[in-house]
Amino acid sequence: MPGLVPGIYVFLDDAKTWMAGHRRAEATPSFRRLCPTMTSVAIDIPPCSSVTVAGATLVVAGVTLVADLSGALFWEEQGLLVVSDLHLEKGSSFAMRGVLLPPFDTVATLGRLAAVIARHDPHMVIALGDSFHDRDAHGRLSTNDREALSALQARRDWIWISGNHDPALPSDLGGVVAEEVAIGPVTFRHEPSGAAGEIAGHLHPKARVSTRGRSLERRCFASDGERAVMPAFGAYAGGLNIRDAAFARIFEATALMAHVLGDRRLHTIAASRCY
């Protein structure tokens, strides 16, 4: 179904309507492994292709994007910011099962999201699914977190892509819920299919590299130039190694690159050099 912005097609979920300009409308629990964005470990990878302080250029199906060091993608031409797998309220979800983690993941994730939105000031934000860790997570948001999310949505269009963790998001979150969004040659969806021009999430890619005699794991963008899978943005989201067979089914193996999130810069390295 076409949206009202020319060239943008929003495939709506549950027959909800979105209008351009309507702007408000699992692994073994381990704290260190679930929250790499809340720790700081130096990473020093030998120079490779595209390295900058703030991020790197990422080309998907001929479209040039900025791979932000936060784990977001920014399409400057469209004024579009994309984040994936926020997994808000994962900490409270674990707590309900008796696994107690520091209850700050939602605050940390929304804080990082606010920072990247302030940096790029997008006209539109697309959250690529699994924005909430379970079907009821949105109901556990604190009043402050709801207000923070509302402030982030103000004066911009916001699209929630439904994910496997949050397939039925309520309308009171603001924005619109959709199954996928197509803009020009690029389609945004939650689960990757391997189609050309696809930008997806779901797999939480990470890369393990060896540097100075030690092994380090970091989140990364996975891309072969025709398609990309984004890293999980959530503070407590885990990851799947880029050498896993799940990535081999999606990407052209010889072209697959890991754009690894370091502390101060993003490092682009061939997936074949990861292990």
Image: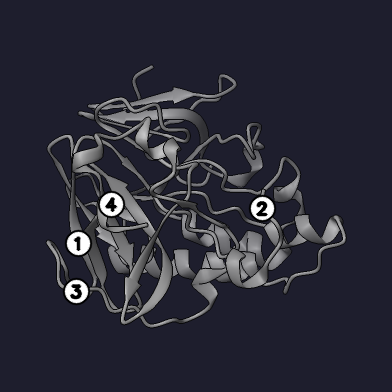
User: What x and y, as percent, mark residue 196?
Assistant: 25, 27
> How many residues crowd around disc 4 within 10 Å: few (fewer than 14), some, or many (20 or more)?
many
Q: Amino acid at mark 2?
A: Ala
User: What x and y, as percent, mark residue 154?
Assistant: 46, 55
Are dots 1 and 4 in contact, CB under 8 Å?
no
Q: Which residue is mark 2?
A: 27
Q: Earlier in the sequence, mark 4 or mark 2?
A: 2
Q: Nearer the viewer, mark 1 or mark 2?
A: 2
Q: Which residue is mark 4?
A: 271
Q: Earlier in the sequence, mark 1 or mark 2?
A: 2
Residue closest to the eye, 186 or 21: 186
Are dots 1 and 2 in contact, CB under 8 Å?
no
Residue at screen point 73% across, 63% down: 142
Cα gap from disc 1 to disc 2, whole angstroms: 30 Å
Q: Quick one: SS at disc 4?
A: helix
Q: Which residue is mark 1?
A: 56
Q: Quadrant of the N terminus?
A: top left
Q: Earlier in the sequence, mark 1 or mark 4?
A: 1
Q: Earlier in the sequence, mark 3 or mark 1?
A: 3
Q: Nearer the viewer, mark 4 or mark 2?
A: 4
User: What x and y, as percent, mark residue 169?
Assistant: 64, 37
Q: Amino acid at mark 3?
A: Pro
